Image (tube, rainbow, N blue to C red):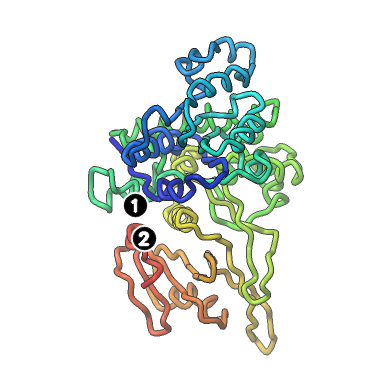
Amino acid sequence: MEIARNKYLDMLKVRMHNSFVKVITGIRRCGKSYLLNEIFYNYLLKQGVNKEHIVKFAFDSAKDLSLIGENLQDLSRNKQKVNPQKFMEYIDLKIKDGNMYYLLLDEVQNLDCFEAVLNGYLREKNLDVYVTGSNSKFWSRDVLTEFAGRGDEIHVLPLSFSEFYACYDGDKEYAFDDYMVYGGLPAIVSMKTDEQKSTYLRTQFQNVYLKDIVERQHLNNAENIGELLNIIASGLSTLTNPTKLSNTFKSVKNVNLSATTIDKYIDYMQDAFIISKVNRYDVKGKKYINTPYKIYFEDVGLRNARLDFRQIENTHIMENIIYNELRYRGYNVDVGVVEARETKDGKTQRKQLEIDFVANQGNKRYYIQSAYDIPDEDKMRQETQSFDKTNDSFKKIIIIEKNMKPRRNEKGYLIMGVKEFLLNPNSLEF
């Protein structure tokens, strides 16, 4: 089954021949290699690029490594990286004329001195370079420095709901139910049973994602960071901070884990693309509030697997899905805070009202509330009181769970169903 990733293909297309290394990042198993080696490769062929001018090489492939006289088993056993001289000699043999060549390099972190090698290729006018890398090396903060400012990052997320639904065998109600439980890792789409999906996600989390962090950071074991992940997963989309998490860790596990260590572990999880930490933004004061903050998962299926599928809270999971969709659409996303004053019993009090998401892109801004259900006027008032206090003209949107075509209420706030929001790429423009 071919899964279209048209958004990311378009991002690669507009970056062609830009004199940068195109660095495809993302959580493991999200489809980076497939995007590069299948979707983009086939696009180049359709554009008339000669097959001999597309050089694909995977640094974790025994077959490819044998082409340059390297042995995958020996490299793994001796914990060695690929000899750059052997690889460069191989590429030199492939470049036979002055026409444009496309280097599609997978798991390039396994190449020793890869930064220097790739920077060298950037000096060649007839080479266009595209690479993927695993979390153990290509982490978000590294991309900015690995190629001396000449790396152009394309961050790939797991399948959005629209991508998931496009290859789902069933109606959108069943599709959304599955998506909320098992998430959007591409391999999930081809699996037929709940047992297959749940086993796959549990295994991936333990043997791939957690292992990446432990190996990268040279941790003695995965127990503490694994337990911290459980606590974060259990408190999905709620305000937290390292001190609060430290106290929870102490009460739940009876183990002292300092706020400093927890803060460091959260950084490790972010760098591995497992979670995103989202700071609060004071809408009126126009400033960021560093703590407390919210944490969302890159994939809700992985979050649910971490809790052994025992804590499927539709309200919080839907909020996480909306957050990921906004990122998929290219928005910078914050949690909004509006300070308001209210008088009670003759006393004036200040309180902070929350806006789930403040989504910014260029000169566009949207205020968005995720409300699983709004059964009555009291709930509507509760969800929109923060909108009322912003005192600006930016569009304000409420997303609910039930199917509902976009419509405006008496205050002009846009209300729509979550599936309508997710499946229409222009849903914010109504």
Q: Tell me where residue 400 sits by quadrant.
A: bottom left
Left or right position of 157 against 81: left
Q: Nearer the viewer, mark 1 or mark 2?
A: 2
Task: Inspect this view and state whether residue 188 appears.
Answer: no
> Residue at image x 45%, y 51%?
14
Task: Inspect this view and state whether residue 13 appears.
Answer: yes
Query: x%, y% of residue 397?
Result: 44, 71
Q: How many marks?
A: 2
Identity, as a three-letter code, of the amino acid under mark 1: Ser
Instruction: Determine contact: label 1, label 2, CB under 8 Å.
Output: yes
Q: Secondary structure at mark 1?
A: helix
Q: Which mark is residue 425?
A: 2
> Residue at image x 30%, y 37%?
2
Query: x%, y% of residue 102?
Result: 47, 34
Please give the residue where the numbered disc 1 appears in the rendered image: 162
Left or right position of 304 against 260: left
Front residue (pair 338, 39): 39
Front residue (pair 123, 261): 123
> Residue at image x 49%, y 48%?
15
In space, the residues marked 1 and 2 are separated at their CA atoms by 9 Å
Q: Secondary structure at mark 2?
A: loop
- The disc, 1 or 2, on the residue closer to the chain's N-terminal end is 1
